[in-house]
Amino acid sequence: MTYFFETYGCQMNTAESAALDLVCRERGWKIASDGEGADLVLLNTCSVRATAEQRVMGRLGFYGALKKNRGAEKRPLTLVVAGCMAQRLGEKLKAKAPAVDYVMGTSARSTFPLILEAVEKDIPPEQNPGFGLDAEKPVFSFSASHLEEGAGESPLRSFVPIMHGCNNFCSYCIVPYVRGREISRNPAAILEEIRLLAERGVREITLLGQNVNTYHWEGAGSLDFQGKSLDFPGLLRLIAAELEQGLSGSPSGIRWVRFLSANPRDFSREAISVMAEHPVFCRHLHLCVQHGSNSILAAMNRRYTREDYLELAAEIRAAMPGITLSTDILVGFPGETEADLEETLALMEDVKFLYSFMYHYNPREGTAAYELPGRIDEKVKRERLARVIALQKQHTQELLKSRLGSRETVLIEGISRKNADELITRTERDEMAVVSGKASMIGSFAELTLSGLRGNTFRAKELISCLGV
């Protein structure tokens, strides 16, 4: 049997697709080169923006036509929709796209083996006991591994989910409604996955959660926490101790840790101290600001002010000089004035982000902001977004040029797409650099000097040293 996945949206969806991929491989299924030749196609969907759902509906139309052709050829295709869109629409999705066989929400991944078994035994979806009105309501559970291995060789970087869901209810965001309330993962399971990844040759991990800062574990599990609950800084300490012990005297292993997403409201000073104390945590942080106006931040229900954000950014940089910051910026929110936009531009000037994910507001039915008055004209939103993008491009170039001549440690990630004789590398500050080298060096940490800049990618003349594979 063969399968093919299409994954949309955030890094959490990527990690969860990797976990489902593992379920397929453990049952002996093989990856198809495309959806047209697969026995099962799964679309892991996103609901953050309406455009993401529209794209999925287009793909469902494509697969619907493919299923009709398959029917004539007596070659069945099972179509599964998973993720946030599946959670939001539920069985209503089948009315919109009748070709869909199974709708698997964010808490229903444990039922995936039942789908595979049904396909293997040629059981029609309506006869699958794991679904339908009589099915038990699923509860979210974390997978044991989220390593993307479907294409063959294990990757050098991997996501490690540590929590799921969100309690913040930002007024524009659908995530709390499709992901549910916050659930933290057993720290013993987190460390076990990290050990597994290290054995498989992973060099860098990214801890994932809709809001990693609010990680909170009350049960001790199989670890001894002296009867205390474990918060995010405590988890970071556990991970640092695990990795630093594993790296003692060895050039191999997981050397870098990142995490996403970090809400400024919940980012504690203790977390800053732990990061600064342990060099295993990369000197880059994605710290979502969303806007620079206090009135818009309040309307978004972000529950911090621009002053809070600027103070936090300053403390982070004081504790870790040279750290780079990136962010999300949302313009055109209902009620936004020209003065509000100017405050966002001013905040960008103060902080100087290495890069930003910038977008304009689109109404999302089911969120509090959907009912707000004062919607901004599309033309105005696009014009304001263009100004934000232009300023960010300026800042990115300024920051990158200021780094020319510096000596950096990099992870060699692969071969450059533009030149087979060059390697693509990444610094811990999340900057890309290209350097001449051999494919056998992929997976090594090395040192180089940033000698040139082409676009947003550094050039280096040669690798100064290699720190091992």
Image (spheres, helix red, strand yellow):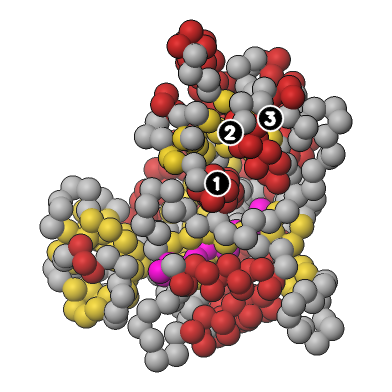
Give above or below for 419 relative to 63: below
The amino acid type, in three-letter code, at marker 2 is Glu
Give above or below for 336 relative to 193: above
Give above or below for 397 relative to 269: above
Image location (x, y in percent) of residue 432: 31, 59
Q: Which mark is residue 27?
A: 1
Residue 209 falls left or right of residue 344: right
For label 2, the SS is helix
- Give the magenta range: 201-211
Given residues 391 and 200, the one toward you in this image is 200
Query: Does the magenta portion include 207?
Result: yes
Residue of label 3:
103
Residue of label 2:
120
The amino acid type, in three-letter code, at marker 1 is Arg
The amino acid type, in three-letter code, at marker 3 is Val
> Which one is closest to the eye, mark 1 or mark 3?
1
Given residues 117 and 343, the one toward you in this image is 117
Quadrant of residue 221 in the image?
bottom right
Image location (x, y in percent) of residue 385: 49, 36
For label 1, the SS is loop
Q: Earlier in the sequence, mark 2 or mark 3?
A: 3
